[in-house]
């Protein structure tokens, strides 16, 4: 992607029937890292997240808690979902709620547009419905119940009985778009990623599409169908539209044209909604389909998908209160191949924190600042003639920056971090081999000592910029300690795609004390 391009990225909007767990935070962090990278690269970036507040599940949860759906949503958004963004340092540009007037009004405009164009019709509907998924279930996604649910059909995901619904509903003629969707997947193989998820989507659509029931009349918590107020809009049809109502659809054409189409980061279990139903809706409205839909894997705990209902959910604060937000962000972006399932364990988190963040990166930063302070009175020295070792460091830095940017463009955040971490390893090896503490004992080696410490400090400058989208707290501290704030300006203002260009930290820059970026943690346990 060239500098200055538009980059509109979204997370799913999350149901407010319960509090967030680390699976939700994982999605938020991934989208945020991508957004920060593009924003700092000069792209016209917009990160959207928010909450999904309509539907039968919310109505039942609120009723069970003795309150109204709107009061329940207000409470959960204020006390749980918006604080989550602070807990893991999400720099979102907007937060949309499906109860916002800007959303509700423009969902009705979109629906009316499809109705007027003949894409919606009335019909009778009978099907098995999972309230947990807010989705009608085909027979392939149902199981025979056992134990207390014997003799009933249950949801394959939630293991809870399905409800037989018989209603007069309005239907979206989704079956009309099967061929156009298949043509989209063929002409733009990058539209659905990763490939394993794309193959599942293509296979699903090839089996043929049924028309989609898009209204409910048995309850009233939702957006009214504009031509028939006895119906409310099906929660998924309503929710998907947040991606365009948040950027001006129906009310700010210039903003909408500036931002759309967007890139959607979602869990793989909701890819079908985003890669089949959503583009069909947009096609029917005469709008562009999304730029891409990326379905990441699940977080597994004890071999099972993270789930509140199965009590495997872990609150993000259980991690951040001990390790900090940077460690949370780093761990989930580094330890899991983005796009695949990944297992979380406290042991792995603690081990990576100690080995990679504390000993690898944090100790490197502390040592370099301390040696510049001790041997050059806190002033970054000038480098002498470059030797083979210094040139090797320069090449590693340049290559890492290039590879990381390419990986980010492919949504491979884990590969980007692995590329950047080669700089950490290279600099640690360089310092060990050059032995600046030995060079400092001989005045004849003064120039070479200056070269070694300039090389190390300049390498840290590049690391601070490249890692700032992932660990913003630690890199901001390092940037200030390097004196780079005064010499080069704010860290977030550094052009990220220029980070690998050597020689940006001016000799003569004054460093300052740096507290441990990742302090030692004792007695880690869940």
Image (cartoon, rainbow, N blue to C red):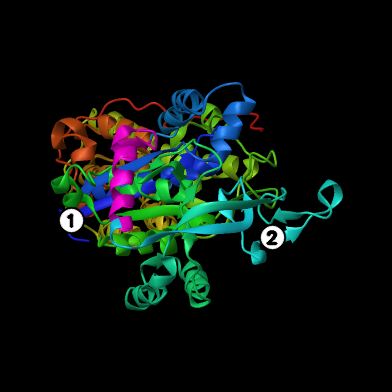
In magenta stretch: residue 496: no
> Residue placed at 17% from the left, 34% from the top?
509
Q: Nearer the viewer, residue 205 or 237?
A: 237
Residue 341 rendering spot, x and y as whole percentages: 57, 57
Task: Answer left or right for 225 relative to 391.
Answer: right
Snapshot quadrant of residue 489:
top left
Instruction: Identify whether 515 is placed above or below 55.
Output: above
Residues in magenta? 90-115
Q: Nearer the viewer, residue 143 or 3?
A: 143
> Residue placed at 30% from the left, 51% from the top?
112
Instruction: Identify whether 121 is placed above or below 32.
Output: below
Label 1 vs label 2, nearer the camera: 2
Q: Nearer the viewer, residue 213 or 330?
A: 213
Dot 1: what SS? loop
Pointer 1 or 2: first along the chain: 1
Dot 2: what SS? strand
Residue 60 rendering spot, x and y as whole percentages: 60, 33
Quadrant of the rendering where the N terminus is positioned? bottom left
Rendered image: mark on residue 142: 2
Q: Which residue is mark 1?
A: 5
Q: Is residue 403 visible?
A: no
> Residue placed at 47% from the left, 38% from the top?
54
Q: Residues within 10 Å of mark 2 (few under 14, many from 20)?
A: many
Quadrant of the rendering where the C terminus is positioned? top right
Q: Is residue 199 visible?
A: yes
């Amino acid at each position: 992607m060239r500098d200055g391009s538009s980059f509109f990225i979204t997370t799913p909007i999350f149901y407010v029937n319960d509090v967030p767990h680390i699976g939700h935070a994982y999605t938020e962090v991934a989208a945020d890292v991508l957004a920060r990278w593009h924003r700092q690269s000069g792209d016209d970036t917009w990160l959207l997240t928010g909450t999904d507040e309509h539907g039968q599940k919310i109505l039942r949860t609120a009723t069970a808690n003795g309150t109204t759906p709107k009061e329940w949503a207000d409470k959960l958004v204020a006390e749980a979902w918006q604080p989550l963004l602070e807990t893991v340092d999400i720099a979102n540009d907007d937060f949309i709620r499906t109860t916002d007037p800007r959303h509700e009004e423009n969902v009705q405009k979109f629906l009316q547009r499809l109705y007027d164009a003949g894409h919606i019709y009335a019909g009778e509907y009978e099907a098995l419905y999972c309230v947990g998924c807010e989705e009608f279930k085909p027979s392939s996604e149902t199981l025979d119940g056992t134990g207390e649910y014997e003799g009933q059909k249950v949801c394959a995901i939630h293991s809870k009985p399905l409800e037989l619904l018989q209603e007069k509903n309005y239907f979206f003629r989704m079956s009309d778009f099967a061929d156009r969707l298949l043509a989209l997947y063929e002409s733009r193989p990058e539209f659905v990623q990763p490939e394993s998820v794309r193959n599942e989507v293509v296979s699903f659509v090839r089996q043929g599409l049924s028309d989609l029931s898009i209204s409910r009349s048995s309850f009233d918590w939702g957006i009214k169908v504009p031509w028939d107020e006895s119906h409310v809009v099906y929660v998924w049809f309503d929710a998907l539209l947040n991606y365009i109502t948040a950027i001006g659809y129906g009310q700010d054409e210039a903003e909408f044209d500036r931002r759309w189409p967007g890139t959607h980061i979602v869990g793989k279990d909701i890819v079908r909604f985003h890669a089949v139903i959503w583009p069909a809706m947009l096609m029917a409205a005469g709008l562009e389909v999304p730029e891409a839909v990326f379905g990441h894997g699940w977080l597994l705990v004890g071999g099972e998908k993270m789930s509140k209902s199965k009590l495997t959910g872990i609150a993000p604060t259980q991690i951040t209160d001990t390790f900090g937000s940077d460690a949370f962000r780093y761990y989930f972006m580094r330890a899991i191949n983005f796009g695949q399932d990944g297992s979380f364990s406290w042991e792995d988190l603690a081990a990576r924190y100690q080995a990679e963040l504390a000993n690898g990166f944090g100790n490197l930063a502390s040592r370099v600042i301390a040696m510049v302070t001790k041997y050059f009175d806190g002033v970054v020295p000038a480098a002498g003639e470059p030797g083979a070792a210094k040139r090797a460091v320069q090449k590693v830095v340049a290559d890492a920056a290039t590879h990381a940017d390419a990986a980010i463009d492919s949504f491979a955040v884990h590969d980007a971090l692995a590329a950047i971490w080669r700089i950490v390893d290279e600099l640690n090896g360089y310092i060990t081999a050059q032995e600046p503490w030995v060079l400092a004992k001989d005045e004849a080696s003064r120039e070479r000592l200056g070269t070694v410490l300039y090389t190390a400090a300049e390498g840290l400058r590049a690391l601070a910029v490249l890692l700032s989208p992932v660990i913003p707290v630690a890199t901001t501290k390092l940037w200030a300690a390097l004196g780079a704030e005064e010499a080069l300006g704010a860290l977030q203002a550094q052009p990220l795609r220029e980070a690998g260009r050597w020689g940006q930290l001016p000799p003569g820059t004054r460093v300052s004390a740096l507290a441990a970026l990742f302090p030692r943690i004792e007695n880690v346990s869940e």
